[in-house]
Image (cartoon, rainbow, N blue to C red):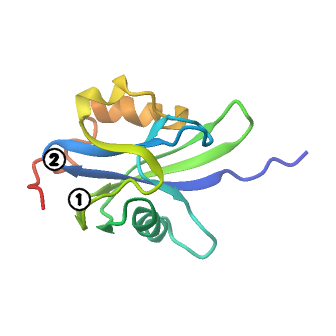
Amino acid sequence: MKQRPPLLVSAGIIHQNGKVLVGQRRKGDRHSLKWEFPGGKVEYGETPREALVRELWEELHISARVGGELARYEHDYPSGSRVHLLFFSVPEFAGEPVGRVYEQICWIELSALPRLDFLEGDLDFIRRLSRGDFRDQLTLTREAH
């Protein structure tokens, strides 16, 4: 049996004032109440960065400038689905984030990220981010808008 290619997913690490923005999936949705970085599936004809800009508009109602790629890897879920995750820095955006598709959104300190119940696919990135692996790529001292 031929294995399907992994689902390509772009995630945004939206950062300001030493914190990152995370969202909690809605109760009853797939992966109910799990935390994640905003973003989503790359559609046919889109680049991963274009998909992230679209997803951030749809999910948070912000116009984002996507920065550099921080990490990428594949993750296999126990259900058999595979995702190819790309994490991008989002150093600037216009608008006030609104959790249009989330139970809640919040700004959180990097060191506190491991305490949240994140999607399994994000856990490797969370460990690396919370221990400071991407400090040089993220300017976490930006002023609020």
**Which residue occupies the extreme right position in the image?**
1
Q: Secondary structure at mark 2?
A: loop
Q: Quadrant for residue 129, please give it.
A: top left
Image quarter (top left, top right, bottom left or bottom right) of the N terminus: top right
Labels 2 & 1 near each other (Cβ < 8 A): no
Quarter of the view holding residue 36: top left
N-terminal label among 2 and 1: 1
Q: Residue at x 32, y 30 (%)?
A: 113
Identify the disc placed on residue 91: 1
Of 73 and 140, nearer the camera is 140
Q: Say above or below: 37 vs 76.
A: below
Amino acid, disc 1: Pro
Q: Residues within 10 Å of mark 2 (few under 14, many from 20)?
A: some
What is the secondary structure assignment of the residue under circle 1?
Answer: loop
- Residue name at image x 59 percent, y 56 percent: 8
Instruction: Check the picture and name the quadrant holding the C terminus.
Output: bottom left
State the image coordinates of residue 80 (x, y, percent, origin top left): 74, 37
> Residue 22 placed where, x, y %?
35, 44
What x and y, as percent, mark residue 85?
52, 48
User: Is 82 on the left-hand or right-hand side of 66?
Assistant: right
Give percent across and percent down for residue 132: 24, 33
Pointer 1 local density, CA inside 10 Å: few below 14, some 14–19, many at least 20? many
Residue type at mark 2 is Leu
When the figure is inspected, residue 123 is found, relative to residue 7, above or below; the finding is above
Q: Is 64 placed left or right of 31 in the picture?
A: left
Residue sticking out furthest to the top? 115
Q: Report the disc number at residue 140.
A: 2
- Seen from the viewer's position, the closer of residues 103 and 108 is 103
